[in-house]
Amino acid sequence: MNYIVVDFEWNQSPYGKNTSNKRLPFEIIEIGAVKLDEEGREIDRFDEVIKPKVYKRMHHVTRNLTGITERDLNQGIRFSKALVDFMAWCGEDYMFCTWGNLDLLELQRNMKFYHLDHLLPGPIKYYNVQKLFRILYDDENSAMSLEHAVDYLHIDKKEEFHRAIHDAEYTAIIFAGMDKAEVKRWYTVDYYRNPKTRKEEIKLVYDTYSKYVSKEFDDKEAAIADREVRTTRCYKCGKVALKRIRWFSGKNRAYYCLAECAEHGYIRGKIRLKKTEKDKVYVVKTLRLIDEEGAKCIGDMKEELRQKRLEKRHREGGHEG
Ligand SMILES: [Zn+2]
């Protein structure tokens, strides 16, 4: 199996968000990729500038960041052509590696815009090198740039950042230096193409948490009422962990619960509701083993929200809402 370390540059409406095409807010203008073999040795490169169809002028921020000009874009090739070439170049047996989680999202959005989504079936299993860097080097800087990681690892900065092939190259160097046994434990699944049916649901188990991505539901109520969504099975032993605090609607439009596995202790459940483009709903549930203090936090959050609701009701004159 090969690793395809890929990076995209994209442009947006130069005249502001209001003039943006909703189906394609970010248009890919450059693809850069480095193909590595299983041992992390470079085999090949892919580097193309794309001639845009939607935003023909560069947004000033993108121009300053990338140095790509309208003249460069005019010499580029069409997205459809570049994409077909790129997918053929990737081959059959490969896994994507990217810095952060945005590249594959924008790739799929652009592919959908050009009706090319069939070329890359989702959900996509890949390595998010930014996330791996955070975990493996124990660096908690969440908004970490590629350049920060390059500096941290004392990698020679011989190329400018923010050109697709250069960023792909830097990401490839970082990825190649990682312990592959460790890397394999922390793969990521992109669910831009979310599961539609029960059979397609995603269940991932990591060392410190588990993640479940549900099928689609008609609405939020149906999703929250679903048994599979509500269940809190301990991801260490597979046994049902008993609820100590039932699911409640908490901060940032997420739902929380507290469960306890007889063997492994407290488990925090968190459900985030996601809307599809067709107004259906699916959930992402994470279960995480936590300590006594973490368990207390959930109780406190619930109590705090209850108080707020009471005060609100009081202010509104006692009407139930
Ligand atoms: Zn357990």
Image (tube, rainbow, N blue to C red):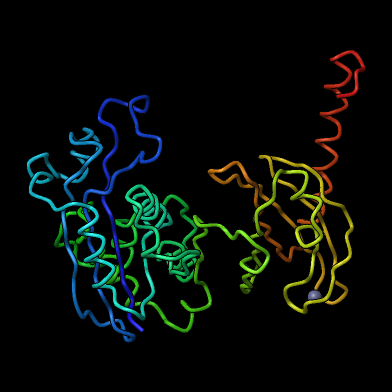
How many numbered marks does the figure carry? 0
Quarter of the image where one finds residue 233: bottom right
Q: Residue at x 30, y 64 (%)?
A: 6
Q: Is residue 17 left or right of residue 167?
A: right
Q: Is residue 137 above or below residue 181?
A: above
Extreme residue in the right direction: 318
Which x, y percent locates residue 249? Answer: 77, 42
Q: Is residue 83 above or below residue 88?
A: above
Is 321 in front, or is 289? 321
Extreme residue in the bottom direction: 39
- In which quadrant is the C terminus drawn? top right
- In which quadrant is the N terminus drawn? bottom left
Is 136 in front, or is 187? 187
Which x, y percent locates residue 300? Answer: 82, 44
Q: Is residue 159 left or right of residue 206?
A: left
Q: Quadrant of ligand 1?
A: bottom right
Which x, y percent locates residue 73? Answer: 13, 45
Which x, y percent locates residue 215? Answer: 65, 58
Is 82 in front, or is 48? 82
Q: Residue at x 90, y 23 (%)?
A: 320
Q: Is residue 54 above or below residue 102?
A: above
Q: Is residue 314 above or below residue 166?
A: above
Quarter of the image where one finds residue 69: top left
Quarter of the image where one finds residue 175: bottom left
